[in-house]
Image (cartoon, grey):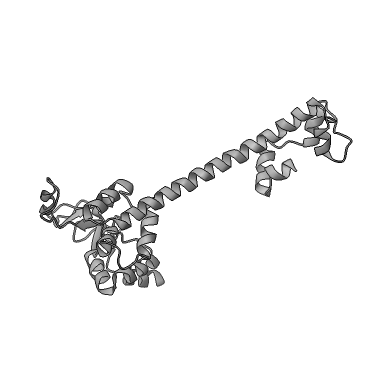
Amino acid sequence: MLNALAHHSSSAMKSAVASRSFRSVADFVHRQNTTLPNSTDTGAAWSDGICGDSFKSAVRELTASVHTSYERTRKEKWASQIEAQNELCTAQQLVDAKTPLEFIGRLMTSCPTRGGGVWESLVALLCGADPGTPLLESKVRAILTGKMSIEVSSAAPAGYSSIAAKARHEVIANGTSWIHCPLDRALLLREVVGEEAFLEIETSMRGVSGWVYRESDIPNRHGHCNSHPNPALTRRFDSFAARAERERR
């Protein structure tokens, strides 16, 4: 029964045999110079004192490794669940943010790049967001384009009025567009913000991204420049529909 708990799959058994961590209960008890109780009810034999101290210590040693393994797994899974819950809470705070500055601050702190649990939760929540979500279109635009506009009102905190000097600000992934957004998520985001708004966002994402060449457009020694970039170092984005058509081919 102990071995069934510890090696419940073929891969676990093979790994235990290879690492020599597998223990035969009968051989282990025999090496400890102990004898198994004659009683058919081992639990009763244990409580009635039929089992010797050496047998009890052998069983405790066998069960200790199994308990330690399961306890370690339990703690790891619990920590993983807590981390996932915290990431979801952070993503929900991003979705509920009522001002651009609040959203940008949380976004740049929690997921400065497009990756990680907070980012995945944020995208999932926005894909199913309620139409009444604050700044919904701006938030969808931010995760797709990597930039966000800030309109500074007269009630803006002191020192923030200078932010209006730039039209849009890089808030994630150095302001690069999410041209590799999965098509199914792009369709969900389009349904959330509406086709007209999504088309405008998609249009702002068009262009070539990747390697930057000299502004004079003079070709380098490999013959590449801004007007003739190296296709291996750049990515061109037209629209999600065009990308879907290319992938379909």
Question: 228 and 195: which one is in front?
Answer: 195
Q: Residue at x 44, y 50 (%)?
A: 85
Q: Quadrant of residue 144?
A: bottom left
Give the x, y percent position of residue 100. 22, 55
Question: 128 and 120: which one is in front?
Answer: 128
Q: Quadrant of residue 49?
A: top right
How many tags in the picture? 0
Give the x, y percent position of residue 241. 33, 72
Give the position of the C terminus as an image quadrant. bottom left
Residue 223 visible in the current orientation? no
* Placement of 147 over or under 53, stated as above or below: below
Q: Quadrant of residue 176?
A: bottom left
* Placement of 73 over or under 208, stated as above or below: above
Say left or right for 77 vs 237. Answer: right
Say left or right for 105 vs 74. Answer: left
Give the x, y percent position of residue 86. 41, 48
Residue 244 visible in the current orientation? yes
Q: Residue at x 35, y 62 (%)?
A: 126
Give the position of the N terminus as an image quadrant. top right
Give the x, y percent position of residue 92. 36, 55
Q: Residue at x 83, y 37 (%)?
A: 44
Question: 78 and 19: which one is in front?
Answer: 78
- Farthest residue, direction front: 48
Say left or right for 246 vs 166. Answer: right
- Farthest residue, direction right: 38
